[in-house]
Amino acid sequence: MSSPARARLLELFQKRALSFGRFKLASGKESNYYINSKKVLFNGEAVGLLGEILWELTKDLQIQAIGGLEVGAIPMATAAVLHYQQHGLPLEGFFVRKQAKVHGSQERIEGIIEPGFRVAVIDDVFTQGTSVLQAIAEVERRGASVVAVSCIVDRLEGARERLAPRYLYLPIFTIRDLGVEHQEP
């Protein structure tokens, strides 16, 4: 997918989110680069672009909900549901807590997902796909069907191999699009 929105979002990620050095990732692995997407996802221009791109990726999938694991998926889901609304289509957003709250409803999913819903599960960065698989498991426990998974950046470290055999795999970028070849530190 090539579009002015995608090109501009890529530029924002390259300028604002990409750092080089020694970093420990959520997976426990070390990397010579880090993508801090929050430096982009809380920027008004980026959120608008992301909503447009997620709309383009998912509009033909007949989904009823979009979301994923906290924190990265929250602004992404918000951008998507707003863009759907601007096109006159309803879409529920949600996020999956890493751990259930100890008070209130004690649920892991915040938002509305009904049994039978067609759902796109999203996250900002995929490495091995472990985090997104946690979100997928919670969505499927609700009786919904995960029809697609998407991320802003695929680090090309195994997520595609774990996810693509089961789900429509829709990364917006790979780390190569950002001009990086992964190397161990």
Image (spheres, rainbow, N blue to C red):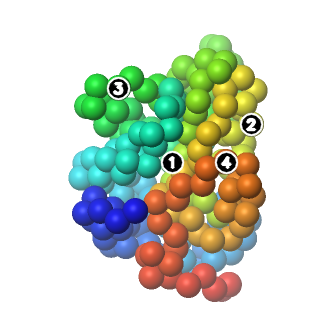
User: Callout 2: helix, strand or loop?
Assistant: helix
Amino acid tagged 1: Gly
Q: Nearer the viewer, residue 69 or 63?
A: 63
* Neighbourhood count class around disc 4 (C-alpha, 10 Å): few under 14, some 14–19, many 20 upward: some
The x and y percentages for residue 21 are 54, 82
Q: Is residue 114 left or right of residue 1?
A: right
Say if 20 sits above or below 90 in the image.
Answer: below
Q: Is residue 52 above or below residue 11?
A: above
The numbered mark, 4 or 3, whose residue comes first in the sequence reads 3
Asked if one can make out residue 68 in the rendered structure from this viewpoint, the answer is no
- Viewer-closest of 116 and 180: 116
Quadrant including the C terminus: bottom right
Going from N to C along the chain, the mark reached first, 3 or 1, is: 1
Residue picked out by circle 1: 72
Instruction: Mark 4 vs mark 1: give the one in front.
Output: 4
- Label 4: which secondary element: loop
User: Which residue does the numbered mark 2 point to in the structure image?
Assistant: 137
